[in-house]
Image (cartoon, rainbow, N blue to C red):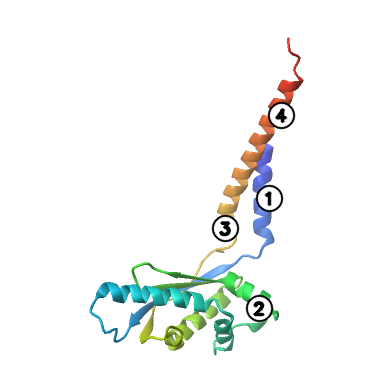
Amino acid sequence: MTLCIFFGIALALGGSFARPWEYTSSVRLLIVQKNTGTSDAYAVLKSAESISDNLSQVVRTSSFLDKVLDAAYGVDKNFFPRKEYDRRKKWNRMIETQGSRGTGFLKITVYHPDKREAHTIARAVSSILIKEGWQYVGTAMEMKLVDRPLESRFPARPNIFVNIFFGFFFGACAGALYVMGRQRMLQKMAPHG
């Protein structure tokens, strides 16, 4: 059983080191609506939440990626494949958006093997949203940068500790199944008397 656990952990570590390590750069924006025409704070908050959800989806589109690549921040265009399918897949894997329920906050996290490039992309995304975000939602609103891009100190993906845990868990399960199967086989082979 111990051998299965070590094998599971070794497999998990091997998988972790086979993939390139990625760092993150996260930025937070606040959505402020202008001239809502209502004094109902709940309605204004729900509207900001809805705008945050819409912008979360917009950021993941290929047209938004084009804006990021064309921005004057110097994002490395060669990092992205030429084929549209592969390009979209890579973009959707490297960007994560998260709206905070009950607020107008939108958090954007960029994953990249190079910390500086992750920072550059996060700056470009936030800048485009601040300048042009209103075009995507069809309402008078303003976006404010509340947290500048912050890079992770350590790689965020793959998560080695989670992989080790799952390697241990699956190794222990495989070991337990092996021991139970072997015990049943020995019981069947034992002489009855």
Nearer to the camera, 44 or 81? 44
Cα separation between marks 2 and 4 = 51 Å
Residue behind mark 3: 159
Split into 4 quadrants, where in the image is the C terminus? top right
Residue holding disc 1: 11
Marks 4 and 3, Cα distance to the nearest angstrom? 34 Å
Q: Is residue 115 left or right of residue 186?
A: left
Q: Nearer the viewer, residue 154 or 112?
A: 112
Quadrant of the image occupied by residue 169: top right
Vertical comparison of 63 with 112: above or below: below
The answer to which of marks 2 and 1 sits earlier in the sequence is 1
The type of residue carrying mark 2 is: Phe
Residue 46 spot, x, y in % from top left: 34, 73
- x then y, percent, for residue 159: 57, 58
Mark 2 vs mark 1, CA separation in Å = 29 Å
- Residue at 62% x, 76% y: name it: 88
| Residue 100 can be seen in this image | yes
Tell which circle, 1 or 4, labels the residue nearer the N-terminal end: 1
Classify mark 4: residues with Cα within 10 Å, few (<14), some (14-19) or many (20+). few
Q: Nearer the viewer, mark 2 or mark 4?
A: 4
Label 1 environment density (alpha carbons within 10 Å; few <14, some 14–19, many ≥20) = some
Helix, strand or loop at disc 2? Answer: helix
Left or right placement of residue 107 versus residue 90 in this view: left
Look at 37% across and 67% down and name the residue there: 101
Helix, strand or loop status at disc 3: loop
Q: Are marks 2 and 1 in contact (CB under 8 Å)?
A: no
Q: Which residue is mark 4?
A: 182
Rounded to the nearest whole Å, what is the CA distance between mark 1 and mark 4?
23 Å
Residue 160 versus residue 138 in the image, above or below: above
